[in-house]
Image (cartoon, grey):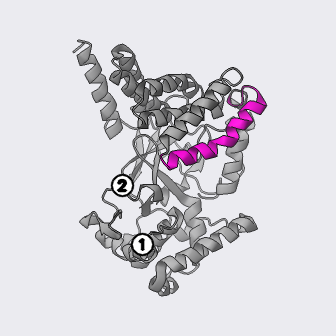
Amino acid sequence: MMTMNIERFVSKGKGNAGEAIHSCEPYSFCIAKDFLKTACHSSCVCLLKSGSFECCSKQAWPDHKRECKCLKRLQPRIPTDSVRLLTRTIFKLLSQTESDQEELYSIAEHQSHLADMSEEKKEGLGHLCTTLQVYLGEENGDLSQLPPGLDPISLLARVTCNCFSISDGELQDVGVGLYLSMSLLNHDCQPNCVMIFEGKRLTLRAVRLIRPCEELTISYTDILATSKERRSHLQKQYHFLCQCTRCTTEDKDCDMLAGEKMAWTSLRDVIPHLKQLQSEQRWEDLLKESQALLHRYTDVVPDRNIYVLRLLDLAMDASISLDDYKTALEYGNRALEPYKLYYSDPHPSRAVELLRVGKLQHYMGRLEEAQGSFTQAYDIMKVPHGTDHVLTNEVRRKLSECQAELGQV
C-alpha cells in the first residue's frame, strides 16, 4: 500500500453508511491457483482439459493470449498467484498507451518497500523472479521495454505490497487483483469503509457516517486475530506498525485467548494442518479431527476463543460438504455469538455467517429461526454490500421464501 500518512484517500464530502464511494475494475488480476480448474468469468480463466488449455471467454482472449503460452510452457505445473499477477501486469504495462492511464497513481508511484524488507524476504522475491523468467520464456526479451525503474524485482515488490484479494459472495478468496487508486487507502482495524466484490469489480462502501475531509480507511487484515498477530502480519506484509486504538489497547485480546493456555496453544498449532485438509477437500478427515479436538477441549476453552472459533468454521464447512446439515447447523449456531463479539455490525463476515446459518435452518424446516437469521443478515448486509448486490438479493429472496412458507405473505 502507499506509505502510511504520506498519501491519504480522503472523503470529498459527507458520506452515509452504505453509500458507495468508489467502484473500479482491476488494472490486472488473476484467478487464485486453487480455483483455476473451476472458476470462469470474463477474465483470463483457462480450463485444464485433456492436458491442454482452453480459453473459456472470447472476450478475455486479447488479454489472455500471451499468458496462455506461458501456462502451456509449465503445464502441469502452475506458478504462484503473485507470479501470474505480475506477468499479467507486465503485459498490461507493455501494451498500454498514455490514453489508457486513468488511475490516480501509476504503478511506478507506488511503494516497493524493498529497503524495508528482510534479506530473507528479498531472497524469496529473487526466487519468484527466477520462476518468472522460466514462465515468460521467449517473452523475457520484452522486459527491457518496461518503464524506467520497474525492473522485475521492484515491480514484484510493488505488486505484492499493493494487491488485494478478490473474494466471492461468501468472502472466500478466489483471486488477486491490482487496483491502483485503491492502494491509496490506509489501514485501520476499525475502518470506516469496506471493499466488496462482484466478480472482479471492487466497490468501496462506507460502513458508518463519514465526515467531510475524513480519511477513508479499510482493514488490510482479518480482525479475527489478536493485536500481536495483526501487528506482526501488517509489519511483515506492509511494513508498518499499526497504532490504531484496537491494537494499542489490545481490545478483545482477553476474549480471543480465553481458556487454558496449554489447550488453546495446541489448537493454534494444529490449525494449519486442518486448513491443509480443507484445501485438499479431505472432508471426512477434517470433520473427524475437528470434532475430536472440539470434544477434547470443550470444558477448558470456550467458543469465543479464536482458535475454537476457527475450528467451528472448519467443522461447519466439512459438514456441509458431506451433506451433514444437522451437524453443520450445530457448529454454525455455536459460532454466532463469537462472530457478534468480534465482527461489529455492519461487518460483512457476520452477515455471511448469518446467511449460512439461515440456509441450514431453512433446509431443516426451522422456518421461524431461519426468518430471524435472514432478517439479521439483510439488515447488516445492505450496508457493506448495498441493496443491489447479488448476495443481498439472495438474502432477500430467502427471507421471502420463509415468509411465504410461514403464511406471512
> What residue is at 61 percent from the left and 37 percent from the top?
224
> What is the crowding at mark 2: few (fewer than 14 residues within 10 Å), some, or many (at least 20)?
some
Horizontal and vertical percent position of residue 334: 54, 23
Given residues 107 and 398, the one toward you in this image is 398
Helix, strand or loop: magenta stretch: helix
Q: Which residue is mark 2?
A: 39
254 over 143 or under it: above or below: above
Is 42 colored magenta in this rendering? no
Assign a secondary structure to mark 1: helix
277 over 102 or under it: above or below: above
Numbered range of the magenta stretch? 256-281
Given residues 163 and 354, the one toward you in this image is 354
> Does residue 207 appear left or right of residue 121 in this picture?
left
Kind of residue at badge 1: Leu
Q: Which residue is mark 1?
A: 71
**From this viewpoint, is residue 81 visible?**
yes
69 over 331 or under it: above or below: below
Horizontal and vertical percent position of residue 94: 43, 79
